[in-house]
């Protein structure tokens, strides 16, 4: 439906003025090429619901929130996920391996819309250790709960991928050769095994990073964060088509960008890979 329809029907002359203001009465192809022309200049156009703001203004105010939270959650996911995966691989078929994989499986199967309220109930309502919502300029205590809720599934996935890849690398011939030479296990892991073991993890990191930054509509809604996830939800509910389309384009551009960065990192980590 139209973004300008609601409980109260607008008079025809008012609707005509609104359509003329936003050029909605132009032919479809004219609207399309005008939008592409604006997009080429970095202009996402006006918002249909937030009358005093353009889409650029809305994205500029909300994207830093999602980016700051996303970078923190991504860093946490990589550090804990890779560390847990390496430990599980080195302690294969021991209680450490079973414990890490058990926690990882739990993190994968429990959705974020269940984890987020549980964290609020435990740490905000019951223990009163952390605030249960809000942003407050990105203060650390306001970021901890959404950061953990956002990163948990990615920690679990990275741990599983790292474990499988590390086990495969540890059974390869060049690792056997390094052991036969009497090299310390710490040096074997850090200098010989870790780099090739991280290649499958890198493949996952590209889309995971975009998903963390842009995809947490549930987390941002539960914790009341003014990020692009909540902005997308509000735009969809308000039928603000220009806002929804712009955020979709932004997510697509970020996906292409970070996948390209992953391809470059592949060549850095493994010199045998060339494009």
Image: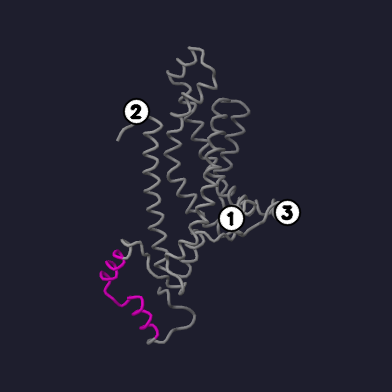
Q: Which mark is residue 128?
A: 3
Q: CA distance from mark 3 to mark 2?
A: 52 Å
Residue lying furthest top = 181
Give the mark, 3 or 1, whose residue is nearer the N terminus. 3
- Residue 34 part of the magenta segment: yes
Q: Residue placed at 51% from the left, 47% from the top?
A: 71
Q: CA distance from mark 3 to mark 1?
A: 19 Å
Label 3: which secondary element:
loop
Question: Does residue 74 lie above or below 7 as drawn?
Answer: above
- Residue 246 part of the magenta segment: no
Crowding near pointer 2: few (<14 within 10 Å), some, many (20+)? few
Residue assigned mark 2:
272
Question: Does residue 178 lie above or below 203 as drawn?
Answer: above
Q: Residue placed at 59% from the left, 61% from the top?
A: 224
Give the mark, 3 or 2, whose residue is nearer the N terminus. 3
Label 2: which secondary element:
loop
Q: Which residues are magenta?
A: 14-37
């Amino acid at each position: 439906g139209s973004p300008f329809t609601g409980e109260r029907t607008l008079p025809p002359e008012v609707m005509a003025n609104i359509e003329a203001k936003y050029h909605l009465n132009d032919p479809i192809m004219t609207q399309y090429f005008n939008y592409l022309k604006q997009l080429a200049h970095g202009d996402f156009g006006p918002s249909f619901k937030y009358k005093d703001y353009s889409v650029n203004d809305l994205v500029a105010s909300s994207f830093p929130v999602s980016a700051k939270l996303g970078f923190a959650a991504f860093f946490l996911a990589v550090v804990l996920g890779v560390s847990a995966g390496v430990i599980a691989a080195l302690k294969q078929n021991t209680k450490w391996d079973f414990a890490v994989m058990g926690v990882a499986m739990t993190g994968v199967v429990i959705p974020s819309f269940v984890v987020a309220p549980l964290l609020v109930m435990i740490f905000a309502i019951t223990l009163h250790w952390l605030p249960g919502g809000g942003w407050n300029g990105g203060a650390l205590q306001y970021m901890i709960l959404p950061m953990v809720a956002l990163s948990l599934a990615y920690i679990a996935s990275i741990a599983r991928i790292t474990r499988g890849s590390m086990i495969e690398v540890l059974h390869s011939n060049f690792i056997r050769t390094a052991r036969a030479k009497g090299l310390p296990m710490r040096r074997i892991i850090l200098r010989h095994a870790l780099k090739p073991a991280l290649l499958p993890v890198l493949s996952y990191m590209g889309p995971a990073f975009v998903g963390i930054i842009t995809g947490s509509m549930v987390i941002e809604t539960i914790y009341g964060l003014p990020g692009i996830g909540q902005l997308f939800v509000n735009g969809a509910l308000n039928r603000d088509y220009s806002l929804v389309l712009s955020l979709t384009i932004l997510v697509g551009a970020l996906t292409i960008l970070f996948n390209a960065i992953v391809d470059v990192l592949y060549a850095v980590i493994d010199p045998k890979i060339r494009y």
